[in-house]
Amino acid sequence: MGENNSHDQAFDVSLNAPPQVGSKCFDDDGRLKRTGTVWTASAHIITAVIGSGVLSLAWATAQLGWIAGPTVLFLFSFVTYYTSALLASCYRSVDPDTGKGKRNYTYMDAVRANLGGFKVKICGAIQYLNLFGVAIGYTIASSISMMAIKKSNCFHSKGDDSPCRISSNPYMIAFGVIQIIFSQIPDFDQIWWLSYVAAVMSFTYSTIGLGLGIAKVAETGKIRGSLTGISIGYVTQMEKVWKSFQALGAVAFAYSYSLILIEIQDTIKSPPSEYKTMKKATLLSIVVTTIFYMFCGCFGYAAFGDHSPGNLLTGFGFYNPYWLLDIANAAIVIHLVGAYQVYSQPLFAFVEKSALEWFPNSKFITKEIQVPIPGYKPLKLNLFRLVWRTIFVIITTIISMLMPFFNDVVGILGAFGFWPLTVYFPVEMYIVQRKIPKWSARWLSLQILSVACLIISIAAAAGSFAGVVSDLKVYKPFKNVS
């Protein structure tokens, strides 16, 4: 995954080029040699996984309590690692002509090669809808963090009891403008540096959130919370049920990266096999993120108990030191700029590749304009890419302004993407690829895992939609001042 390694999925001339087998510059499929390693793949995964989801984990733990909270976190991490390993094994499928492993460049390619038919369309619709939803979730999260910086400075200068009411709309628009610029980066390989920056930022704000939680527990000298979570009375019995379900969605979202796993794997060099490298990168990333999640969720809950905020660094459980909160929230914004791109690039590539297949002779789709930059190489701007990616960012920004509910959106996305993309398709593809006989012990255990995760996803979706309905009762679009 180096700077000069650009196997652009959208405008790849090598798709029609003869494979340069044995060449030092090309891989076995005729594309430029991949240079990704365990570390670059781990950086991509950590960028995708330790996202804004970590900030809602104290709230999620508060809904579930000291027993169920950490248990749910651990179970999700185990299931994600196990099914990610199944999915990584589907990166190559045997080519019937040569008998060699044919690469699947995207998640949809893997489903097409192993399952085929209608399932490919279902997978594509879920995957790309989810990527679209993540872009909305990240726009909301970044605006909340930008507002938090403004608010913490306002509280610092005017006192903790000041109203300090701020609209999130200008911040969402600012984030959208930044994304319009970054979205002109042609493909996944060319954002490797953005992943490194984003991974560092995610550790920065997670560590600050964790540190403030530990400091709060040390300051008060007591661990808040209860074994069963938020108590009836503080919420009604029905609210307790819905919020517990919503918490499952928040945890699922915190682990959702399967939808871009194959795209990350397609940047890894071989030998050793991409599967072995990806398995190591997945294990390393999930161990690191789970330790972080346990600490952030548990110390956040220990610090605030039933009052744990929906977003640990912007719910103003903490006011001081205000400069440290500002650094944490600035790190969130920088991280989300990168994470938005990591998630959007596969969607961009799919639309551009489809457009090229449908209209191969269209000048609007194929023509590139050279924009001179003094002292640098000229920038290649593709007109279709410029127009369509800009429209995409504008749409995600407008939807974010219409529905800026961080916890609810996180829960819906987690519930919607977790079962089909993290569990169902990897399990089904693995069964087909390894020819596991129906009703065998292995087949039965995989199906039980899949059904259990489906039930969890349905419960999480129900809880999150109930949250949106209750929020919409008191919300006026475009007047989101807090």
Image: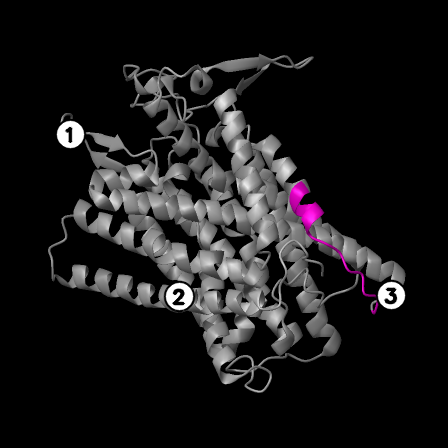
Looking at the rendered structure, the kind of residue marked 2 is Leu
Helix, strand or loop at mark 3: loop
Where 139 sits versus 72, above or below? Answer: above
Q: What predominant SS class does the magenta segment belong to?
A: loop
Rendered residue at 55%/38% (across/down) = 393
For the record, the magenta segment spans: 161-173
Residue 129, percent from left and from top: 41, 47
- Say left or right for 33 vs 441: right
The residue at which mark 2 appears reads as 75
| Disc 2 to disc 3, C-alpha distance | 43 Å
Rendered residue at 59%/33% (across/down) = 180
Q: Residues within 10 Å of mark 3 (few under 14, many from 20)?
A: few
Give whichever of 457, 64 is nearer the camera.
457
Could you tell which of marks 2 and 3 lies nearer the N-terminus? 2
Q: Residues within 10 Å of mark 1 (few under 14, many from 20)?
A: few
The residue at which mark 3 appears reads as 159
> Do labels 3 and 1 touch, CB within 8 Å?
no
Q: Residues within 10 Å of mark 2 (few under 14, many from 20)?
A: few
Helix, strand or loop at mark 1: loop
Q: Is residue 279 visible?
A: no
| Disc 1 to disc 2, C-alpha distance | 38 Å
The residue at which mark 1 appears reads as 99
Of marks 3 and 1, the one in the foreground: 3
Helix, strand or loop at mark 2: helix
Looking at the rendered structure, the kind of residue marked 3 is Gly
Looking at the rendered structure, the kind of residue marked 1 is Gly
